[in-house]
Image (cartoon, coloured by chain):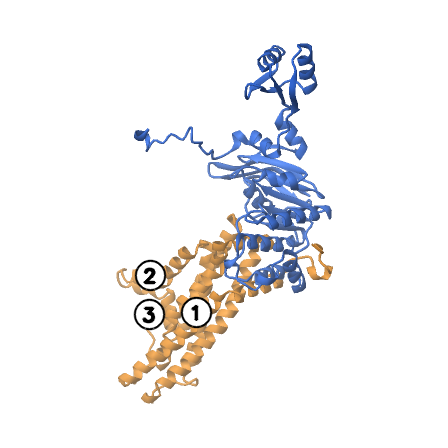
Chain colours: A orange, B blue
Amino acid sequence: MTTLNASSPTDLGPGRVTAVAVVRSEWIKLKSLRSTWFSLLAAVLIVDGLGTLFSALHAHRGGRDPFDLDATQISLRGVFLAQLAIGVLGVLVITGEYATGMIRSSLSAVPRRHPVLFAKALVFTVVAFVTAFAGTFIAFELGQAAQSSTHLQASLSTPGAWRAIIGAATYLTLIGLLAVGVGFAVRNTAGAIATLFGIVLVAPLLTNALPSPYDQDVMKFLPLSTGERVITTVHPDPNLLSPWAGIGVTALYALAALIAGFVVLKRRDA
Amino acid sequence: MIEANGLTKRYGAKTAVDELSFTVQPGIVTGFLGPNGAGKSTTMRLLLGLDRPSAGGSRINGKRYLDLPAPLREVGALLEARAVHTGRSARNHLLAMAATHGISRARVDEVIGLVGLEDVAKKRVGGFSLGMGQRLGIAAALLGDPGVLLLDEPVNGLDPEGILWVRNLLKALAAEGRTVFVSSHLMSEMAVTASEVIVVGRGRLITSGTVQEVIRAASGGSVLARTKAADDLARLLAADGCEVQRSDDQTLLVSGADSEAIGELAARAGIALIELTPQHATLEEAFMEITRDAVEFHGRGPADAQPAALGGAR
């Protein structure tokens, strides 16, 4: 045992926990887990693979109805499966800490607790958006290339194309943030994933059971519909919210989940 | 310096920690003893602000843990339940912890060296043995060079060499003037490590003081006397108001008189003594004695474990 004391006092930092430092810590945590990179890779492969596949299948069928054709939307349909990969990552960002006990280390370093939630949400937002945008942009390009035989493919200058690409990436990011909030609120991996899938996938099915026109009234506010609308550039369903209004509603779901997570984090024993 | 004041934690109807008050002084190793389920780990979590007390409170260096501006610089903690993500490498775990306080990479590598984890620092913690996990936990506790250390069962899962290492580390940390608070259910370990002990059972404070005080209070100063005339001596001692236990035909265990009184009594009666020895309990025995009523789960010995299912076979 040579030195128990730090060899240099400057090595011990400024003597307080800052918001920037907590963000840096969360970035180290996120990037140092393999599950992060697997989830992100899965999300990109799903968006790009399915987008290309749907586009190729469409081209193979010959693109019969040019009037109804939404080449952009076809190439971005992979987001509805990819949202599960992003959502699982969002959940694991926090439930992985509860499952392993890491949360006790995290909260003993940051006893006020809420900076951990803000830092996780911020780091996740940046990483998820960058990944999702790369995924949707590439999916669009690959998808249009796969549809080139129809001569009806879209390009980046097609009206609504950029909105669909950016909107799809934003939608994926917001679903991921919803998952982060649900993870903080539920704290258990299986429970949080089940809750997330319930909100994203099961709620639309249940809405179908409502009598008309209530089903439409409810459906247009659900995440799946808002995501559908933001990637649609041709003949949108008039019952749906406008693309950015839908994204705004999705953001409100994410915000509500994060507030629930904040309350649980602040009040419950770790 | 750690102060707990009426610290209480209830989970529903169960009271895990019951109005616990104590002070832990710097410069010495203080043992926190109690059987499993006595509330030691809950107390540790309360001290760290991880659990909210139902009543009472605690302060470290005069402040609530939540109010410490840089908690890792003042308090290092090793929690009994592992508090590390199994998918992350040891070094990345320490880097993430260090980053919250702006503690440098150099310090991270320093504590890795200090606990002897250089060879496995880049391996994922999920593959660590219990002993390696404990070393990592100790590294995390030392990260901020804190003046107060809270260590919950630090020797758990360590091999003899590791136990010796922890023992020396704790003493060295205390010798540097730090407050070292170590929980354990192993009395023998605390007997050689701690100067003061705080003994709890069922969440309540049973006793506290120096190791010697606790032992003296629990052993009650009985004396072993051996003589060929055990019957005669027993009769005389009993007449004198002593409590006498016969362990075999020559041996008596006497409480209520010291060796001097017993020796004089025997001399006056013309009884030759073969042996006369004051009995000192070990900390282990003292602990068993004082926590006998506070053990949450009693094992049943073979004698009273009635084999109901096998009853017919008897």
Badge 1 or badge 3: first in the primary sequence: 1
Badge 2 or badge 3: first in the primary sequence: 2
Labels 2, 3: front one: 2
Q: Which residue is mark 2?
A: A202
Labels 1, 3: front one: 1
Q: Are marks 1 and 3 on the same chain?
A: yes
Q: Which mark is residue A172?
A: 1
Badge 1 or badge 2: first in the primary sequence: 1
- Dot 2, how many residues are within 10 Å of its Cα: few (below 14), some (14-19), or many (20+)? few
Residue at coordinates 57% horizontally, 40% vertically from top-left?
B186
Give the CA separation, mark 2 to mark 3: 20 Å
- Give, as a three-letter code, the residue at label 3: Asn
Give the CA separation, mark 1 to mark 3: 22 Å
Q: Which residue is mark 3?
A: A239
- Give, as a three-letter code, the residue at label 1: Leu
Residue at coordinates 37% horizontally, 78% vertically from top-left?
A51
